[in-house]
Amino acid sequence: MIPVEEIRTTALRALTKGGLSLDHATIQLDLLLDAEMRGVPSHGLLRVPRVIERVANGVTDPTTKGAQSWRGRAFLDVDGKQGLGPVVALLALETARDRAAETGSCVVAVRNCDHLGMLAFYAEKLASEGKVLLGMTISEALVHPFGGRQAMLGTNPITIGVPAEPLPFVFDMATSLVSMGKIHDHAHRGVSIPEGWALDAEGNSTTDPDAAKLGAIAPFGGAKGYGLGLAFEVLVSALTGSAIGTAVKGTLDSMNPCNKGDVFVVMEPALSVVPLVSGFLEDIRHSAPVDPAEPVRIPGDRAVATRERASREGLTVASEVWDRIRLLAEV
Amino acid sequence: MIPVEEIRTTALRALTKGGLSLDHATIQLDLLLDAEMRGVPSHGLLRVPRVIERVANGVTDPTTKGAQSWRGRAFLDVDGKQGLGPVVALLALETARDRAAETGSCVVAVRNCDHLGMLAFYAEKLASEGKVLLGMTISEALVHPFGGRQAMLGTNPITIGVPAEPLPFVFDMATSLVSMGKIHDHAHRGVSIPEGWALDAEGNSTTDPDAAKLGAIAPFGGAKGYGLGLAFEVLVSALTGSAIGTAVKGTLDSMNPCNKGDVFVVMEPALSVVPLVSGFLEDIRHSAPVDPAEPVRIPGDRAVATRERASREGLTVASEVWDRIRLLAEV
């Protein structure tokens, strides 16, 4: 267990040595550390070295906050200028939040921006500020269509944040059955993956994680989940004009400028809905479970509990990730 | 096979005899007939008698178009005044479409409005007019949480429409594994349902469709699909202030005013994205299939082909539905 403050200090030093201002390093690390603390290491600290490599390779500009312009009073266009995902996105969401307070809603369409990371980070922030947030992004093609053999679609997550008490409701899921991070983790541990998770490079079903890394992940939920991921890909590209399908690059590698799009819709809730929503969530938590030992869960509850434990007890970080970050901090 | 024009004339007569103006009857029937022709009979002609019953019972006002007001320049609040779903929703979408042309986007939050029917109808219309549409609605609680035994959530569909050629991209799915209509259909035919589709009234897994009618349908896609349906329910209620969970009434019965909410977001696409989106959809259609005899499908393609065939060859309508409509037309 490493105390969170020790991780924060070390990773901040690594990021600032890598060319980020303290302000931008703090924003980037807040996002990655939040993912790590919520139990989503695929979107956590392992991306610290990736960010530094991308800056060193000149495909990420750590100084820009992106350029904002208005397609209309309720549609913010953002050219990310190859900036850091959370730096560009958080500033855009602040602008949209203030506009939505006046217009009732505001769409944000981001292009040319680095990986936004775990979308729950943004949904929790906006919902804590009393807004409803819907967010979608796409990634490099990693997912095969239902009935198909080739990776044609991103993992295309959606997030929804809604004000509630005692905590905002924050939902965040990818439309792939599993993350590529989970497949890498199985490969790393030398453990086979379950049948149905992935195809190899030839499009045949495989339980070998190393073969799966070169192939395609299944969509979740069969034909429906495939349709949903496809619809998000089409919607995001149509609103941003960004790359689509196999043309998407730069969300996973350190060599390519990132050319995918991201979309948010910031909306004003109806008056006094917090008791309505919060009561409903409580009703679900207390509804009859299949297994009396396993109460019905609300998405996000477990992540928040995991984060609280991490902030008290510290984090277990994969040793190669932690060693790498310490090395980058000391150079 | 009954020619579509014969169905149209007969059903219009039934609806106008039931108290709808010819204008409103035409709008209501366009929606129901489109669903029937696309191969979605659960949202098709069987709802003609339901509409007439609801009007007769005084829970639907067939004359109103709802009352529109602005929460802000890009947020249209609609009180449906217990009006017909497509009458209220289409007028609201016209208002929002015109506003989005100026502001770039417009949210529509509808309350107190009857069942909107198949959401693809609205997505196809807006996408044909060059807009991107995202739509969500909720229904009476029919779906159990992942790991739960009780019906707590609606079937909560989402639709996404995006301009494309030769046809707009139109996605529409419920977040339940199957529709209650499909379970009723199995009950009607005396056929058992597959394991995993539904629970009985005590929350135990059942293959008896009559027991399932009193119980709960499974969410699609396990924990993810459950989370998605829950997130839509929370989002729709938070934006509309409408009923949530087991308090939702009037989407399936003929006795209760309809108290659920509906949400749409109308958005302006980026310039010249139609070739980008259309090319991507073509790439997917031509990507390698698992079964060489089964090309990879784009959601909506089969429904459009089914509709074209129906418009040439006519429709097979369940005889009790057709007999009922003819009876209502002749009274």
Image (spheres, coloured by chain):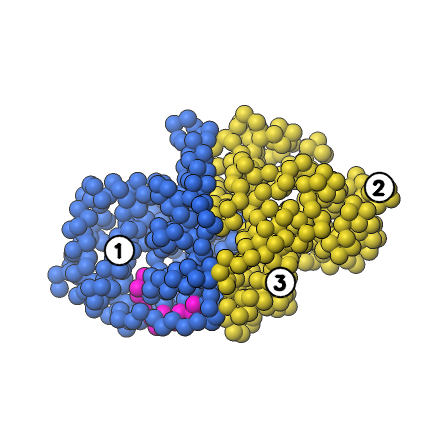
Chain colours: A blue, B yellow
Q: Which residue is mark 2?
A: B327
**Tag in front: 1 or 3:** 3
Depth check: give the residue in front, B23 or B225: B23
Q: Which residue is mark 1?
A: A30
The chain under label 1 reads A
Q: SS for tag 1?
A: helix
Q: SS for tag 3?
A: helix
- Are circles 2 and 1 on residues that touch, CB within 8 Å? no
Badge 1: residue crowd in 10 Å (few <14, some 14–19, many ≥20) = some
The chain under label 2 reads B
Q: Which residue is mark 3?
A: B94
Relative height, residue A26 to residue A168 (above, below): below
| Tags 2 and 3 on a common chain | yes
At x 65% / y 29%, what residue is drawn? B210
Direction left: furthest residue: A330
Badge 3: residue crowd in 10 Å (few <14, some 14–19, many ≥20) = few
At x 49% / y 60%, what residue is drawn? B72
Q: SS for tag 2?
A: helix
**Amino acid type, residue under disc 3 in the picture:** Glu
**Amino acid type, residue under disc 1 in the picture:** Asp
What's the magenta region?
Answer: A76-87
Confirm whether residue A238 shows in the render: no
At x 30% / y 51%, what residue is drawn? A35
